[in-house]
Amino acid sequence: MKRAIKTHLNDFVAILGLLVLSFAVAGYILSHERFHFPFLQSSPFTVNAEFSTAQAVTPGQGQSVRVSGVQIGQIGNVTLKNGMATVSLQITDQYKHLIHTDATALLRPRTGLKDMFIELNPGHAAAPVVKPGFTIPVSNTLPDVNVDEILASLNADTRSYLGLLVNGAGQGLKGQGGSELAQVFQRFEPTFRDLARVNRAVAVRGTDLRQLVNSLQRLNTALTTDQANIVSLVDSGAKVFHAFASEDTNISRAIVDLPGTLSQTTATLAKVQTFAKLLGPTASNLLPAAHALPAANAALVALAKPSTPIIQNKIRPFVVAARPLVRNLKPAAIHLASATPNLSGTFSVLNHLFNMLGYNPGDSPTGGQHGYLWWLAWGDHNARTLFSIQDANGVYRPLFLQASCAALEQIASGVAGSALVLNLTPIIGAVGSATGICAAQKSGAGGGGGLPIPPIPPLPIPPLTPHGPSASTATGARAPSSKAASTGAAKPTTQRAKGH
C-alpha cells in the first residue's frame, strides 16, 4: 500500500485534491439550496400559521417569509389539520423576538407563476413575544385570492356586464385613449396626495376607529334587542316628517330666508372672533386672580367666623334700635336735599371769592399788580401800626370827644343803649337821679355852692410811626378842652373815651 502510494504519489495527491474540492462545492451548493447541516447549524425558530387554503405553497422551494419586504425565514412543511392548512414558518434566530401573539400573515404571489411568499405583520409591541410552536389563528391570516374565484362569486349577468366593461375599456384605451387616461390620472395627483394624508391620519387614529366600530357594534346590538321602541321611533319619525310635509310652504320660505340669515351669522361670527381675540388675553390675565381666589376665600372665612357674633349680637341690635331715628331723620333729609342746590351755589360763590382773593397776577415787565392777599397783609400791618399806642388806660388809641351836657343827654335819650356804649352815665348820671358831672355843674351854677370841677390835663400824644398817615391828617388827635364864654351857661365838658 505504501509502495503503491509512493509509486503513484502524484496521482494520489490529485485524487485527494479532487475529493476536497468536491466536498467544498457540494457544501456550497447545499448551503445555497437551504440545506440544514445538523451539527453545524442550530435548529430554526418555528412558528405555525393556519390558512383556509395553502395553494401553490411548496416546501423546500425557497418560498420566503418576509416582514416589510425583508426576508426573516422560509416556509417549511405544510400539513392539514381540522380542515385548515397549517404552514410551518422557519424564522431565523435573530428575528424571533420580532413576532408577537397578535401577528397577522398574508399569503401572496411574488410572480405571475404563483411563486408564493408569506407577508408577516409582527404585531404590536404591547403584546407578548411568541414561543416556539405558536400557531397564528386563521382569523389573523388571509390566503391568496384568484381571479376565477372572483368571477365564480358573480352570477351570469354580472359576468356578462363585466365582460362588456372590459371590452369597452379596451376600446376606450385604443389609440390616444391610454395617454388621455394617464393625463386624467395625473390631474388626480393632488387628490391622491390628500387621500394619502387622510389615510395616514386614519392610520394614526386606528385605535380610536376600532373603539368607534366596537361602540357601533354595541349600539346595533342594543337596537336589535329593543325593536318595539325602534318601531315606535320610526312611527314617530313618520308623523314628524308628515308634519314637515304639511309645512312645505313655510319650510320653503325659511329656506329662502336662509342665505340672509347665514350672511348675518357670518358677520356676527366675525365680530365674535374679534371678541374672542380680546377675551383670550383677558382670560389669561385673570388667571393669577383666579389662582388667588382660594387664598382670598380662606382669608374671608377667617374674617367671617369672628365677625359673625359681632354682626349678630351688636351691629344688628344697633340697626334695629336706629330705625326709628332714621325714620325721623327722613323729613330732615328731604329738606336738606332740597337745600343742597342752594348750598352748592353758595359754596361755589365762596369758592370764586377765595379764588379771587388768592389770585396773584405776578410781576410783569410793565409793572404788575399784587394780589388781594398782599394788600390784606399790608392793611393788617398798617392797622397794627395805627393802634400800637397804649397808655395806662389800655392798648386802645385814646380819643377825646367834646359835647355839651344837653347834647349828651339828647343822645342818651334819643338812642337806646348809647349811654352804656359811650359810657355817658358818669357824665349825665342815671335817669331820675341827680348824680353825674352835669348835675353837679347845674347845682353849682344855681346856688353858687357847687364845687368847681378841676380840668383834666391832656395826655401827651406820641409821634406816629413812618408807616402810618401824616400827623397833619391823623385821626383821633386829642381835642383840647374849652370853657363856656358866659357865666351861668352850661359849661362844655371834656370826656376822655376809648376809641378804636
Image (spheres, rainbow, N blue to C red):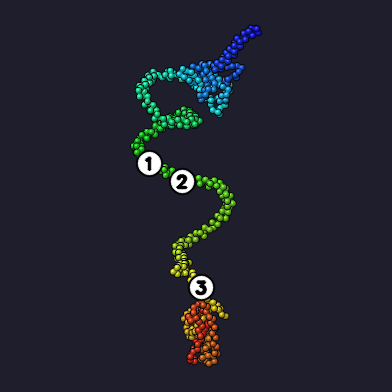
Q: Which residue is mark 3?
A: 380
Amino acid at the residue labelled 3: Asp
Label 3, secondary structure: give it: helix
* Contact check, label 1 and label 2, Cβ < 8 Å: no
What's the mark number on residue 278? Answer: 2
- Is the residue marked by circle 1 packed among few (<14), some (14-19), or many (20+) residues within 10 Å? few
Label 2, secondary structure: give it: helix
* Contact check, label 2 and label 3, Cβ < 8 Å: no
Q: Residue at x 53, y 46 (%)?
A: 288
Horizontal and vertical percent for residue 179?
37, 25
**Mark 1 and mark 3: Cα distance apart in space:** 82 Å
Residue sticking out furthest to the right: 2
Q: Nearer the viewer, residue 351 or 193?
A: 193
Amino acid at the residue labelled 2: Leu
Q: Is residue 356 visible?
A: no
Q: Is residue 182 visible?
A: yes
Determine which quarter of the picture holds residue 4: top right
Amino acid at the residue labelled 1: Ser
**Mark 1 and mark 2: Cα distance apart in space:** 23 Å
Q: Which residue is mark 1?
A: 263
Q: Residue at x 50, y 87 (%)?
A: 482
Horizontal and vertical percent for residue 263?
38, 41
Q: Earlier in the sequence, mark 2 or mark 3?
A: 2
